[in-house]
Image (tube, rainbow, N blue to C red):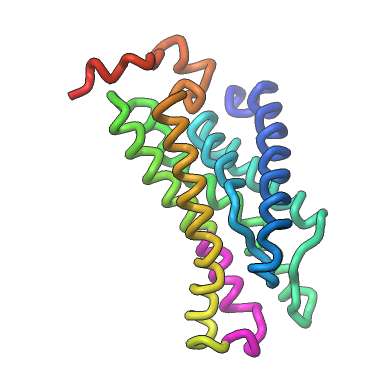
């Protein structure tokens, strides 16, 4: 536990959360004309995914939580008619969405112990898909429960929420996952926990010579 919350780890959490907020903000600016009710296409998920593999689930969850809190502080979308519904909607769309992406950290051990690039990429793909779709699920549930019926002009709330949230979340998952896969292939040491693995199990660019 001391290692999980070391000074270096918490410093990384702060840096990654700030970077994620900036990426999310920029994506929101150019995506606003397309997604007027919230949502954006960008790669802010990358910082949560990278932290999940680099430091584990809990630090990644903290990164996601701070990003969500910063988003709320900067302004949020809520069109519900009562305070408790607004609170629940904000929780699903902001406080829970990015932290759920930290579930990618469940594949951290698989990545750390992977014998070759192929297995490292597999661990990254599975983790990013899990974390990304859990984040999508949070937005999807919010769309069903809280967004008004006059927006459900295509197949009712279940279909509308699927189409609207899927339209930006699917590109986000694919783009962010692709970035992390690139890092896993070209700079795998960056995804390893420095204090534990870099010196003990160094990964060299030439490790492909040992792969079959």
Q: What's the magenta bit mostly, secondary-structure-wise?
A: helix
- In the rendered image, residue 136, in percent from the top left (x then y), is placed at 52, 61
Q: Residue furthest left?
A: 212
Residue visible at 55% across and 72% down in the picture: 164
* Residue 83 among magenta residues: no
Image point (60%, 78%), residue name: 145
Say which quarter of the image contains residue 111.
top left
Extreme top residue here? Answer: 199
Q: Name the quadrant containing residue 121.
A: top left
The residue shown at (40%, 13%) is 202
Residue at point 63%, 59% (across, down):
40
Q: Position of residue 57 (x, y in %)?
A: 52, 39
**Image-based side of 58 in relation to 205, left or right:** right
- Quadrant position of the N terminus in the picture: top right
- The magenta region covers 136-152
Look at the image and tell me in which quarter the C terminus lies. top left
State left or right for residue 96 relative to residue 211: right
Q: Nearer the viewer, residue 13 or 50?
A: 50
């Amino acid at each position: 536990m001391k290692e999980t919350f070391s000074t270096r780890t918490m410093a990384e959490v702060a840096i990654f959360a700030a970077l994620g907020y900036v990426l999310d903000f920029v994506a929101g600016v150019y995506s606003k004309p397309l997604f007027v009710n919230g949502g954006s296409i960008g790669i802010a998920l990358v910082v949560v995914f990278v932290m999940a593999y680099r430091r584990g689930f809990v630090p990644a969850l903290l990164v996601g939580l701070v990003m969500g809190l910063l988003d709320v502080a900067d302004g949020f979308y809520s069109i519900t008619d009562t305070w408790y519904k607004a609170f629940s909607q904000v929780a699903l769309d902001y406080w829970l969405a990015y932290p759920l992406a930290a579930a990618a950290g469940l594949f951290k051990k698989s990545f750390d112990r992977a014998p070759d690039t192929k297995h490292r990429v597999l661990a990254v793909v599975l983790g990013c898909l899990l974390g990304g779709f859990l984040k999508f699920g949070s937005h999807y549930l919010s769309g069903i429960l809280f967004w008004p019926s006059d927006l459900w002009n295509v197949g009712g709330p279940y279909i509308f929420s699927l189409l609207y949230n899927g339209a930006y979340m699917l590109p986000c998952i694919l783009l962010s996952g692709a970035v992390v896969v690139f890092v896993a292939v070209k700079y795998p040491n960056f995804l390893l926990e420095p204090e534990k693995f870099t010196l003990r199990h160094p990964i060299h660019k030439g490790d492909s010579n040992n792969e079959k």
